[in-house]
Amino acid sequence: MPASRRHHRTLAVLVNCLGVLAAVPALPPAAPRAVAAPARSAPPPALAAAPVRPVAAATPIPTGVPAVPPAVPTTGPAPVQPSMPPVSVAVGAAGTPAPGYRIEVRNAGPAPVETMVRQELPTGSRATTVTGGGQRTGPVGATTGEVTWRLRLPARSTTTLHTALAVTGPDRSVTAPACVYGTDGTRPYDCATATWVAAAAAPTAPATAAPAWRRPPVLLAALAALLVLLAGALWWVARRRRRGAPVPAGIARSGTGPTGPVGTAGPLAVPTCPADGDGTPVGPGMGGPTDRGTVYPRPALPTPTVRRRRPPVWLTVGVAAAVLAGVVGAAAWTATQRVAAMDTTKQPTSGAWVGSSVTGALGVPLRETAFEFTVYRMSCGAGAVPAAPAGGRPCLATVGVRNLTSEQQTWHGQLQRAYLPSGNWVAADEDATRVANLGRDVFAQPVAAGRRVLLPLVFTVHGAEPPKQLELRSGVFSAGVRVDVD
């Protein structure tokens, strides 16, 4: 073997050996085979009684591969689980001729509680009777008037309050919510609402629809049908008259004669036909005398041409005009009724919006796709906390939120808006709302399925006028609800 080949082969062997040696440290160590442990005899009593020392944990063998971090369960924010407050309130409407309410405040705790009870008065009403030492206050700082009580509730007791209102205008349904707060009057323990309905008020009779013969679509359809029937009758009479008109005898019997007729000359001449013994005329081609002695058969008489009768032009145009007038009139009436039924004050509820927008007053539960919102109170200025930044005024709304779905739902502060009389709106002040809820971020935690939470929302407005309407919604594409607070 030449020396060059031996050198190349030796060099190749050395390179392969180096490669194997370099790859050995990176390989994972082989797991030792399980060896059957020899049976051991029972330890002597002296050793069995000795205390067992903890065995040191085995030191892991370094393999050069990074260890996998331990699995950490990923959990989202816990849902808002409203705790049952020791104080609750129930409101019921009294069966009196004038609007009246019965408010029951109950303390289920083992200790007395200092509370403040507020009942909102609807717009256009005033309190005439207040029991339990309540005070009537006007809309100073608040959007509506209210009645306020400061009560010390004994342990496991129920306190009953009564109010009577006077409203302006005819008898109507009156809703007056009530809430029980802490001593500061801003953090609610519980809220309830009730609607008084006039007992003597007669039920509103449903609007009776106009008779069928007075409805524009029915009148137009009847007119169109009458015109069609009249046109058809005229066409039938004209046709009957044409059929009964006298026609020349030659044309009525045989029609146009053939070219070169037999008998009297002329295009309308009737060929002379001999008669049989009984007097019946026999025409050409029927085996009569005229056919005898002829070599070629005579051609038969041509069949009279019957023209298809068409309705006159005036009839066709009249019927078309009547039908067109009926269709246009019905379409115009339908469009007018739909336009008149439109509510220009509502927000769009189709297209990208989910659900329909609902509008109500204070204390009225309003539902949308996921939540049921109830606004119990709205106040601005000194009665709201915390203090707003320079140039702003805080407005605090007591809102109840109930999750109507079977899953927990989140909502966002930027979607909750307060509309001012000028048309501008402001979103909920999340920092001030967190302070009003004792540091709890109500928007960061979802609302549990089927649960109801009661919390204050703070809106910071600029100017002296309070908000006119609140818009609350659960999601970006939800149509939401609107609450009139002014």
Image (cartoon, rainbow, N blue to C red):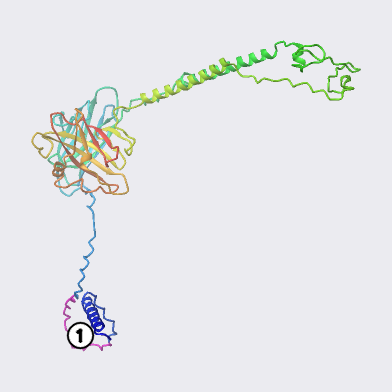
User: Which SS class for mark 1?
Assistant: helix
Number of numbered discs visible in the structure rendering = 1
Residue 145 x, y percent position in the rendering: 18, 29
Residue under the point 79% across and 23% down: 300
Residue 340 x, y percent position in the rendering: 36, 23
> Can you say whether 49 is above or below 272 in the image?
below
> Can you say whether 13 is above or below 191 in the image?
below
Disc 1 target residue: 48
Residue 351 visible at all? yes
Residue projecting furthest to the right: 277
Front-lying residue, 323 or 89:
323
**In this rendering, would 320 be left or right of 179?**
right
**In this rendering, would 335 be left or right of 443?**
right
Residue 268 x, y percent position in the rendering: 76, 13
Residue under the point 26% across and 29% down: 99
Looking at the rendered image, the quarter that the N terminus falls into is: bottom left
Residue 259 picture quarter: top right
Residue 9 picture quarter: bottom left
Front-lying residue, 395 or 92:
395
Query: Is 349 colored magenta in this rendering?
Result: no
Magenta stretch in the rendered image: 38-59
Kindly identify the amino acid type of the residue bearing the numbered disc 1: Ala
**In this rendering, would 127 be left or right of 407?**
left
Residue projecting furthest to the front: 2
Residue 291 x, y percent position in the rendering: 87, 22
> Can you say whether 221 is above or below 424 in the image?
above
Residue projecting furthest to the left: 390
> Can you say whether 456 is above or below 360 in the image?
below
Query: Is 52 colored magenta in this rendering?
Result: yes
Residue 208 visible at all? no
Looking at the rendered image, the quarter that the C terminus falls into is: top left
